[in-house]
Amino acid sequence: METIADGLRSIYKLIEKGQLDNALWEITDLEENLRKKCPGLIDKYHLKTYFSKWRTRLLRTNAQGIQLVLSELDLLIRKLDQVVID
C-alpha cells in the first residue's frame, strides 16, 4: 500500500542528495500516478500548485528555492502520511 507521503519522501531524499534532475522526474511521475489512480486528491490538497512551484524552483537551482521545496515537502509528508494512493 503506497501513500502520497512515500512518493514525497523519495523526492525529498533526491533533492537532499543534489539529484535535482531525478527529483524533477519523480515529481512528474508522482503527478501522473495521482492523475490516473486518484485525481480528486490533486485538487483536494492543491498538489498541482505544489508540483508546478517545485519544478520552477528546482530548475532555477538557487539554494533558497531548494530549501523552500524541502520545507514544503516536509510539511506535506507529515500531512499526507496516511493518504493512500492504491
Image (tube, grey):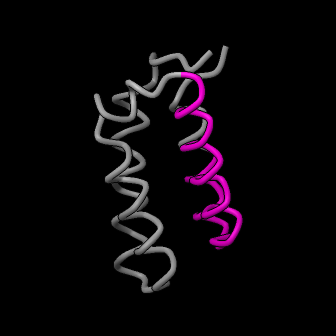
**Along the line of sight, which residue is nearer the eye, 52 or 39?**
39
**Residue 40 on the magenta segment:** no
> Which residue appears at 56% of the width and 20% of the height?
85
Residue 44 rendering spot, x and y as whole percentages: 28, 28
The reply, left or right, for residue 44 in relation to residue 3 is left
Residue 27 rendering spot, x and y as whole percentages: 57, 53
Instruction: Quadrant for the N terminus, please.
Output: top right
The reply, left or right, for residue 59 in relation to residue 6 is left
Residue 9 rendering spot, x and y as whole percentages: 57, 42
**Along the line of sight, which residue is nearer the eye, 86 or 61?**
86
* Vertical order, 84 against 42 (above or below): above
**Residue 21 on the magenta segment:** yes
Instruction: Quadrant for the C terminus, please.
Output: top right
- Label count reads 0
> Which residue appears at 37% of the width and 43% of the height?
47
- Magenta stretch: give its range: 10-37
* Vertical order, 49 against 68 (above or below): above
* Vertical order, 86 against 41 (above or below): above
